Image: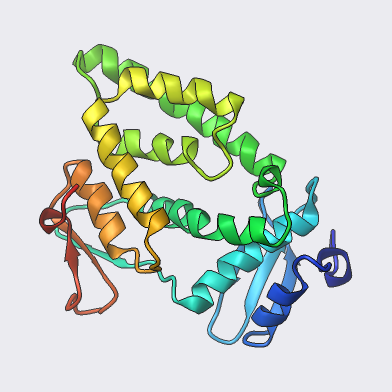
Amino acid sequence: MPYTIDNLVDNRNQALYTEITAQLPLQLEPSTIPYWGSQFGQESATIFMVPTEHPIASFTHELLHLKLRLDGLVRPTAFTARQLEMDTVNFFYNELAHHKMFPLFLGMGFQPNEFYSQLDAAQSHDLLAIDLARLRMRRRAERSLLTGLDVARPYMLIYAPAELRASMVRYAQQLDELADRRFLRMLDDTLIEWIETDTLDMRRTLARIYHACGITDVGFGFDSEGGDLVLAREVAA
């Protein structure tokens, strides 16, 4: 195992660690992929580790994921007759969670550049290089400014908390040249509302994203019968 609890808990995250472990037993395991991660179970939680430059910060990042889950942040279920990629819904869920976690992370005394490990940052840059290359090809083929989920995904990576550094500015400029400006403003408004509103209920935010992307025949809810749906067609993008 790359780290132990003694390596990963200090005066900055001690209170958070105590809060989590008072509610759930916490296990540490080596990650089978080159990234940190966490898994929330009914009777325990697990944090998966890999060596990183700032291991205490990486551990705290995962503790914050668990804290939000315990505080009520749950990924809504998507209800739709169309085939929907759940990987994309999960991606938005994870990225939106980061915006709730980031102020808590800074408030504990960590630096903004520690929020993501160097492995996370490298993955984001790799994904953006691929996504933007595809968008350039699509722009040439369609000869019009772009909208849709394949624009929203790189948008969320570019505007992840602490990520709009010099290395991200060039990606933001490229996206601005390829995407419809009204569409980008809708994403801006949706993200700002999520950041500024004191809620962990993600249904409306996901519905707004899908509405902006032109996918209105989808709803998001927690009730397995769909009784509490927030419908994309009924929210303002």
- Tell me: 46 left or right of 70: right
Residue at x 40% of width, y 66% of height: 198
Q: Is residue 36 visible?
A: yes
Q: Quadrant of the N terminus?
A: bottom right
Q: Residue at x 19, y 65 (%)?
A: 230
Give the total number of marks visible in the rendering.
Answer: 0
Q: Is residue 42 left or right of residue 122?
A: left
Q: Measured along the vertical axis of the image, is residue 21 above or below residue 108? A: below
Q: Quadrant of residue 89?
A: bottom left
Identify the image quadrant of residue 221: bottom left
Residue 6 as seen in the image, left or right of residue 113:
right
Q: Position of residue 188 (x, y in %)?
A: 33, 40
For the rendered model, the colour scheme is: rainbow
Nearer to me, 39 or 99: 99
Q: Residue furthest right?
A: 6
Q: Is residue 37 visible?
A: no
Task: Determine the residue positioned at 38% across, 68% down.
Answer: 199
Q: Position of residue 14 (x, y in %)?
A: 77, 73
Q: What x and y, as percent, mark residue 45?
A: 62, 76
Residue found 37% across the figure and 48% down from its top: 192
Image vertical order of residue 22 relative to residue 197, above or below: below
**Residue 187 screen position, x and y as percent:** 31, 41
Note whether 222 is above or below 53 in the view shown: below
Q: 204 or 11, which is in the foreground?
A: 11
